[in-house]
Amino acid sequence: MRIKHQLTIFNAITRALMVLTIWFFLPILIEKVVYKRIDTTLLEKKTKFIEHLDKEEINAFLLRKDASETYASFSTLHNEFVQLYQSKHGPKSNAVFIVNEPRIIEGERNDYRVLYYDFTYEHTHYKLEIASSLSEIQDLTFAIRIFILLVLSVVILFTFLVDALFIEYLLKPFHQIINLKIRHVNEPEKFNYTPIHSHSTDFMELDEVLNQMMKRIQELFSIEKQFIANVSHELLSPIALLKNRFENLIQNDSLDDEALQKIESSLKTLDLLKKIINNLLLISRIENNQYSINETIHCKELLQDILHDLQDRIEEKEIQVQQHQIENFEFVGNKTLMHILFYNILVNALKFTEVKGSVDIVTVSDETHYKVIIKDTGVGMRQEQVQNIFNRFTRLNVATEGQGLGLAIVKSIAHFHHLEVEVQSEWNKGTSFSIVFPKSKKS
């Protein structure tokens, strides 16, 4: 997931959490504020009521001295009431406490904020109740919740879009650096040194440092290429000179058989050294992108040409080579390198397959990939060996010929062409190499 999407989602989540927090806690805070205001009002009403107990209407009730009688006053809409009645128990030091209680008044049930007050008047204990309805508070709280939810949802949607556009604008230079520069770091000679315009000094510094780094890498690549060219000349020339001298010595009739054997052994050693140097130079040139990829290659024709070149080895070991549904798949690459890739894999398959064994070549195609599978019935490999076969100078069987560079070359060529090489092997049952081509590689 791209960083702009991560930032946008993060901002949206944080805003959603803020909305939920406000939606949950704001009504609670409002209730507390409202309750405090109601409590203050109830206390004021209590004070006024106690101060006016000498009114005739109240005194008439008090003079009855009948505990079953109750003085009550209700508002028209039942949103508040006052009740006074004699208390069976004495007052608790003029205690006042306020609670929320449901009450049924004239058949209508409502929640009230009720103030209780115990006091003594003219040697008689009384309890005073003054209440205010909470129905309006509950309705207001619910309306506030809905309002907050709607308003903040709109705010989230709006800020999400604004954030997405701003982040896209802010990170545009970063994506340009990735698409125009970082994706091409494997090709220093094609690197784009054009400065990226940005309003952020961070991206400008990143672009400048990247340009400086690539210039340095390009210089090192040029030095390495020159070094490889010099090494190939300086090493191969003495080898060729020694080989010519040894070949001339062989023509000398005065040498005995022991001397001739030593000279022939030295020639073989020189040939082996020449092959190792050439293979190492090949790997180095591939890794330095010194080959072009602009040829249209026909897979079926390429495999048939290689099998024709290896016909002598096939007949010598009486190996049965079977081709199953080989499609003439076309792809763009370097024909010489792809010839080496398939050649090395097939040579390995023939080398490690017993006499009268078999080698199968199969092609498989799906919606996204095209796969060439080369499977043999050879000695196979253990899992710990499979993990190391592409390392340079790795030889699974020291008794066989080779320098341990064939599969290292295969890996380098596959990486150079952006291909995948899959290996499956089972000890004493055989090995399967799969070269996977993406369908986008089709010409």
Image: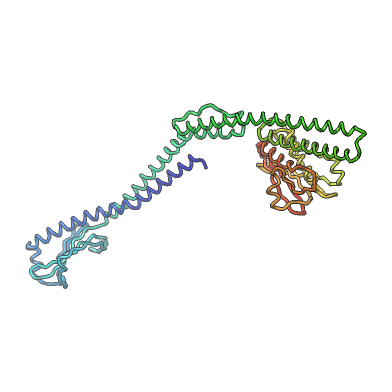
What residue is at 66 percent from the left and 30 percent from the top? Answer: 225
Q: How is the image coloured?
A: rainbow
Q: Position of residue 110 (x, y in %)?
A: 26, 60
Q: Position of residue 7 (x, y in %)?
A: 46, 42
What residue is at 69 percent from the left and 31 percent from the top? Answer: 228
Q: Is residue 412 visible?
A: yes
Does 344 sit above or below residue 82? above
Give 192 or 443, whichever is nearer the viewer. 192
Q: Is residue 443 visible?
A: no
Is 21 placed left or right of 180 in the picture?
Answer: left
Image quarter in which the C terminus is found: top right
Is 153 placed left or right of 366 in the picture?
Answer: left
Q: Position of residue 141 (x, y in %)?
A: 30, 52
Residue furthest to the top in view is 194
Does 48 sit above or below residue 298? below
Give 402 or 13, whichever is nearer the viewer. 402
Give 281 or 380, whichever is nearer the viewer. 281
